Amino acid sequence: MEINFNVHGKQRKKLVEQIAEYTQQRAEYQYTPTYAYQIGKYTVSKDGNLLSPDEIPAELVTYLKQQGFTSSETVKLNITYRRNELTDQDLDNLRHLIWAKGQLIKDACQLNSLSLTIDDQRVSFDWFTEVNTDDAPAYQQLIDKLVQYAKSHQRIMSTPRDESNEKYAFRCFLLRLGFIGPQYKTQRKVLLKNLTGSAAFKNQEA
């Protein structure tokens, strides 16, 4: 995940110090060629971007905002898993799951493509270019739960189907993935807001 704070010079150094204080991690300058700072798993680039291999907690973003650092309204999601974390069957399951629910996922996340980039080192989800900062954690968790679902099932044989009530169908799918309970209320709201229909009733006229 990447968030652009667009700070340079002394302001970038102050941003690094605040992240180090919040995380209780030491900031290490990386010198040439990146000129970045490394703070635990976080990186602050020379352009003032905060990068993380996974989700950047909303609490950290809020803390930085309180210190005077305002991020842009959109972020870029770079969602990648190590290739050795998934077996060939896991990948087959993941592809099948994405194929079966592809149209719902596209409509929910307003995507044009659900392509995966796979090599010997990593599996990358090239889905998101820029998304709203507030929505990014929900999209990150959706992909993580898709991966975990694929890994936890021996074989996935779902097939695509036309859905007359997208919102109800996707809500049921989210519950199957594990978006259950009040702790996922915000994520469900984000992931359902772009869909048509009723989340409460399968038949919209009910």
Image: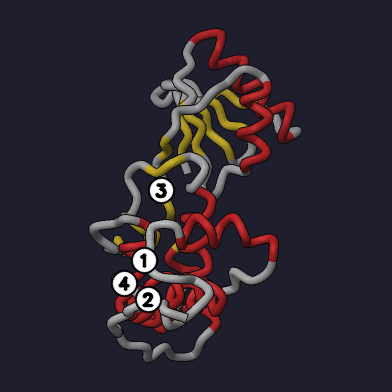
Coordinates of residue 82 in the picture (x, y in percent): 46, 61
Q: Are marks 1 and 2 in contact (CB under 8 Å)?
A: yes
Q: Which colour scheme is used?
A: secondary structure
Q: Is residue 127 above or below residue 56?
A: below
The residue singled out by tag 2 in the image is 165
Q: Left or right: where does residue 166 sit relative to residue 206?
A: left
Q: Which badge, 2 or 4, comes first in the chain's sequence?
A: 4
Q: Which badge, 3 or 4, comes first in the chain's sequence?
A: 3
The quadrant holding residue 72 is top left
Q: In this view, does 74 lie above or below 188?
A: above
The residue singled out by tag 4 in the image is 102
* Mark 3 residue type: Asn
Give residue 196's mark.
1
Q: Do the residues labelled 2 and 4 touch (CB within 8 Å)?
A: no
Q: Are marks 3 and 2 in contact (CB under 8 Å)?
A: no
Camera-side mark, 3 or 4: 4
* Mark 2 residue type: Asn
* Mark 1 residue type: Thr
User: Looking at the image, which residue is at 44% across and 57% down?
Assistant: 193
> Considering depth in this image, is 68 or 181 the residue closer to the camera?
181
Secondary structure beneath label 1: loop
Coordinates of residue 197 in the picture (x, y in percent): 39, 70
Secondary structure beneath label 3: loop
Q: Which badge, 1 or 2, comes first in the chain's sequence?
A: 2
Other residues around mark 1 within 10 Å, as few (<14) / some (14–19) / many (≥20): some
The quadrant holding residue 131 is top left
Q: Do the residues labelled 3 and 4 touch (CB within 8 Å)?
A: no
Q: How far apart are marks 3 and 1 (CA)?
A: 28 Å
The residue singled out by tag 3 in the image is 78
